[in-house]
Amino acid sequence: MLIKTAEFICSNTQISKLPPPVMPEYAFIGRSNVGKSSLINMLSAKKGMAKTSQTPGKTQLINHFLINDNWYIVDLPGYGYARVSKNKKEDWNKFIRTYLDKRESLQCVMVLIDSRLEPQKIDIEFCNWLGEKGLPFVLIFTKADKQSAVKTDQNVAKFKKALKATFEEVPPYFVTSSETHDGRDKVLAFIADTNRHFVVPPQPTFNAE
Ligand SMILES: Nc1nc2c(ncn2[C@@H]2O[C@H](COP(=O)(O)OP(=O)(O)O)[C@@H](O)[C@H]2O)c(=O)[nH]1
Ligand SMILES: [Mg+2]
């Protein structure tokens, strides 16, 4: 897919204020510092669209970016940031899980995993939650340029093995680097393909009386 336009639309702290669910959207999520903002900038070919390396845990917003006037990248706050209070973590959980569970136009959750690391409990638990809810997701392994392809493959294999404890079928996955742009075409091709199957969900109708 060729990216012709990419623009920031809105930041939200309230589910009720999200844009109408009339276009397919893809939610990007992962641990703080996983490389989410860098990946969003890399995919959209717009440097600085999603701000990189902001103070983690500071912004708890759902950000919508409109791509090619016909689909959304949704930037969700990162999880697993140690220095966030327990209350804030609970707020995060409630807000994000409600969004993920209820958003009619959400086509796929893009779960970002740091390719340098062994499977992390928090990532596996989040995938399990998506599985329980029946939400479609794919794995995006980030920062692949930081180590050898062999090491990346080993970590991918370990992650798949960890998921097999709960999943019959492991979801599709992509290996990416925001530095070298590896994986960009494949992720965009997946999104283009999914977009083709999008059907606008029924909209609430307003009764004049
Ligand atoms: N080498 C390399 N560094 C990356 C890559 N992606 C992100 N980074 C770096 O990792 C740090 C965190 O990235 P950021 O996109 O802000 O992560 P976020 O907190 O998940 O949004 C920054 O210093 C980035 O420059 C990548 O693919 N390769
Ligand atoms: Mg970020």
Image: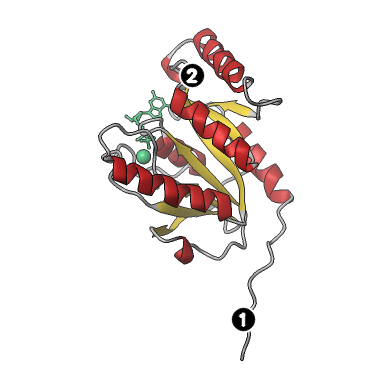
Judged left or right of residue 126, residue 163 is right
The residue located at (40%, 59%) in the rendering is 12
Q: Which mark is residue 143?
A: none
Q: How many numbered marks does the figure carry? A: 2
Provide residue 144's location: percent of width, then percent of height: 48, 20
Disc 1 target residue: 206
Classify the position of the C terminus by image quarter.
Answer: bottom right
The residue located at (30%, 40%) in the rendering is 86
Provide residue 176's location: percent of width, then percent of height: 52, 26
Classify the position of the N terminus by image quarter.
Answer: top right
Q: Earlier in the sequence, mark 1 or mark 2?
A: 2
Q: Quadrant of residue 138?
A: top right
Provide residue 173's location: percent of width, then percent of height: 61, 27
Q: CA distance from mark 1 to mark 2?
A: 47 Å
Q: Do we see residue 129 in this rendering?
A: yes
- Disc 1 crowd, CA 10 A, few/some/many (<14, 14-19, 20+): few
Disc 2 target residue: 119
The image shows residue 48, relative to residue 34, as above or below, that is below
Q: Quadrant of ligand 2?
A: top left
Ligand 1 within 8 angstroms of badge 2 C-beta: no
Q: Could you say which is closer to the camera, residue 15 or residue 153?
A: 15
Provide residue 90's location: percent of width, then percent of height: 37, 45
The residue located at (49%, 47%) in the rendering is 97
